[in-house]
Amino acid sequence: MEKTYILENGLLERYVLGELSKVENQQIEAALNKYPELKTELEAIETSFETLAIENAIDVPTSVKPELLKNISNATSKVVSISSQNTLRPYLKITAGIAAVFCIGLIYMFTQLNATKKQLRVVEEENTKLNRNIENLNNYLMETNKWYVAINDPDVQKYVLKGNALMPEATVISYVNDAKKSVVINTKRLPKLDADHDYQMWADVEGEMINMGIIDRNKDMLAMNYIDNTESLNITIEPAGGNDHPTVSQLITNVYLK
Amino acid sequence: MSDDKALILKLQSKDETALGLIYDKYSAALYGVIIRICKDEDIAKNLLQDTFMTIWEKSQNYDFDKGRFYTWAYRIAKNKTLNFLRKTDRLIQVEDLSVYTNRTEEVADKLDYLKLKGTIKRLDAHHQRAIELVYFNGLTHREAHEEMNVPLGTFKSYIKQALKQLQQSYIKIVAFLMILIEVMR
């Protein structure tokens, strides 16, 4: 019988439940020997049913066990009475029984221990992962805090640079602090440029454009050079790496400071 | 599940202590199956004893390669119970059918403790019913799908899905216990 046929027709379940004919049973057993995956699946089905039965077990009236053992002794005593004259035998049996129970117990404890160790290792790995996460979050928090402090200063003036006809979708927010002599800009809404070009920021001081720095394409928030007596802020598109003088035809936005 | 192999080998060499231990381990689970099929305590006690007599006599027939020991024992218990019911069913049907149906309902009411419990209660109602029919009522897939009035293919998938869900909940429970053990140490 084919593996997929057996799996798709629920034959393993019916095999466990004892619903199959003798011939079908033999076919399943042959297939089990041939395909180890089937054996794993069978084991899972059996364990599920067995656990189900254990969860739904019902206490047996205590009279059944002694009666059963008596019946069995009667049934076997004829054979036993002739062969076993050794009085040590029952004690050996009891000792062996106890030893067997201990053995089973030990094996059980051992597998339990191994499973627990494995579990512990998983938990430790999780822990390292979590710690790393916390570290990342802390770094992120510190970074955010730094920007928050920088733009939340009472001395800060906020200027919004809206894109001109060349790039109407661009928006840059700048925070100028004349007391602390700092300029911070938010470039989240600035469209990405190709690898050959960079945005560059300029300060207009008495008609002269002074370089405030190249805008880092990988950051959303960044500090630029503060220039004294700036009359307006300007952003141009320049060849990658920046330019000494602004290419005025590539000016995309500017704003006058109050 | 611990390794019973040594114990079962002892049983196969006709060790009565081993039978006692196996009885302690499996009797309540098997009794739960038998009494749910026959719904009568006295009959169930006899059938359980009969089942263990067969386990004792036929233990040589159990083959480790063909599945778990409990599965083998379950099949014996279920067959004995169904055979017994088939024999008596015929007698009762000849006498008076109505008496029989009334009686089962009455008994089923009395035997409230036969209701299923544990993880299975967390499954959808139709999954619970499917498992109950084949496992605790002794119906075959063919009988059970008619009883539930769904196509056989659908019924098979009910059983498959139900088993998968049971298996997953058991894994969760075991994992939870492991963590609990870990925490207590």
Image (tube, rainbow, N blue to C red):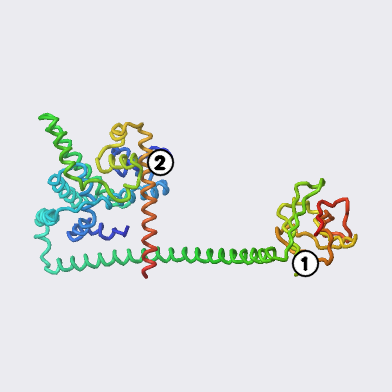
Q: Nearer the viewer, residue A2 or B49?
A: B49
The x, y position of residue B87, in whole percent, is 15, 36
Residue A25 makes an appearance in the image: no
The x, y position of residue A233, in whole percent, is 81, 58
Task: Looking at the image, tell me whether mark 1 or mark 2 is earlier in sequence order.
Answer: 2
Residue A115 makes an appearance in the image: yes
Amino acid type, mark 2 = Leu
Q: Nearer the viewer, residue A183 or A117?
A: A183
The x, y position of residue A232, in whole percent, is 83, 58
Q: Quadrant of the N terminus of chain A?
A: top left
**Residue B90, disc:** none
Task: For mark 1, name the chain.
Answer: A
Amino acid type, mark 1 = Asp
Given contact means CB atoms under 8 Å apart, are the residues at marks 1 and 2 in contact?
no
User: Residue at 25% of width from left, 40% of height from top?
Assistant: B138
Q: Is A254 displayed left or right of B157 in the figure?
A: right
Name the residue tied to disc 2: A7
Task: For mark 2, name the chain.
Answer: A
Crowding at dot 1, Cα within 10 Å, few <14 / some 14-19 / many 20+, comes out as some
Q: Quadrant of the C terminus of chain A?
A: bottom right
Q: Is residue A17 above or below residue A233?
A: above
Q: Secondary structure at mark 1?
A: loop
Name the residue tied to disc 1: A178
User: Residue at 82% of width from left, 51% of height from top?
Assistant: A252
The image shows a total of numbered marks equal to 2
State the image quarter where residue B123 is shown. Answer: top left
Crowding at dot 2, Cα within 10 Å, few <14 / some 14-19 / many 20+, comes out as some
Q: Label 1 to label 2, Cα distance in Å?
A: 76 Å
